[in-house]
Amino acid sequence: MYKVLEINEGIRNWELVKFKDKTKFAFQCYRLILKVLNLLIPNFLEQGVTIVKQEAEFENFANLDIRVGEITKVKKFAEARDDAYKLWVDFGTEIGIKKSSAQITELYQIDQLKGKQVLAVVNFPPKQIADFMSEVLVLGVYTKSGVVLVGPEQEVKKGAKLG
């Protein structure tokens, strides 16, 4: 039997969850780490703390396929644990339209997103989030107010590669 904390709304609201399945336990541990980081990062930013990760090799970056896509469709993701949108992003003829789940509701309304160009990692394996298969990771920057999407400064061709 494996046990891990489940943090609900805020660090003070938690419960101990038990798992028999090692995979579900590992996934829950990963979710816990992400939730704790999401709670701590805004506080660190307010205090001027810089979080630096372990040094990466250029090959790590070169393995990522980061492309420009245009958001063509947006829906509220009611089934997600945290507030999120379902996005459909068009990466042009080579890659096509891919789906993504994005926790960007603090700073973006649905009508602001359609037609917006964003950068996304297109070569991660798909990830099941509730009843939705997220196929790409749309990139954003954490701020005190919420996540700010990353995109080109000027309009570029769909599918253009960051490099």
Image (spheres, helix red, strand yellow):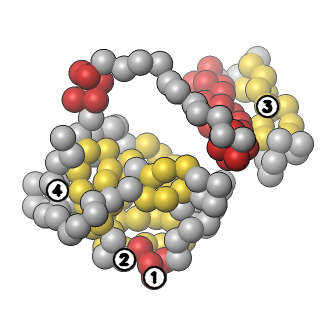
Dot 3: element? strand
Is residue 137 found left or right of 4 in the rendered image? left
- Image height of 67 relative to 71, above or below: above
Which class describes the residues within 10 Å of circle 4: few (<14), some (14-19), or many (20+)?
A: many
The answer to whether marks 2 and 1 mark residues whose Cβ atoms lie closer than 8 Å is yes
Q: Nearer the viewer, residue 153 or 75?
A: 153
Q: If you read the primary sequence from the N terminus, does the residue marked by circle 3 or circle 4 appear first?
A: 3
Q: Nearer the viewer, residue 89 or 55?
A: 55
Dot 2: element? loop
Instruction: Tell me the residue at 27%/60% (across/down).
Output: 152
Query: Residue at label 3?
Result: 5
Q: Which mark is residue 114?
A: 2
The answer to whether marks 3 and 4 mark residues whose Cβ atoms lie closer than 8 Å is no
Cα–Cα gap, marks 4 and 1: 23 Å
Q: Amino acid at mark 4?
A: Gly
Cα–Cα gap, marks 3 and 2: 37 Å
Query: Residue at label 4?
Result: 159
Instruction: Tell me the residue at 17%/64% (across/down).
Output: 156
Which quarter of the image is occupied by the C terminus? top left
Q: Amino acid at mark 1?
A: Asp
Q: Percent from the top left, x then y, of residue 43?
A: 73, 43
- Image height of 5 relative to 42, above or below: above
Is residue 103 found left or right of 69 in the rendered image? right
Q: Percent from the top left, x then y, of residue 67?
A: 23, 50
Instruction: Tell me the residue at 20%/59% (across/down).
Output: 91
Dot 1: element? helix
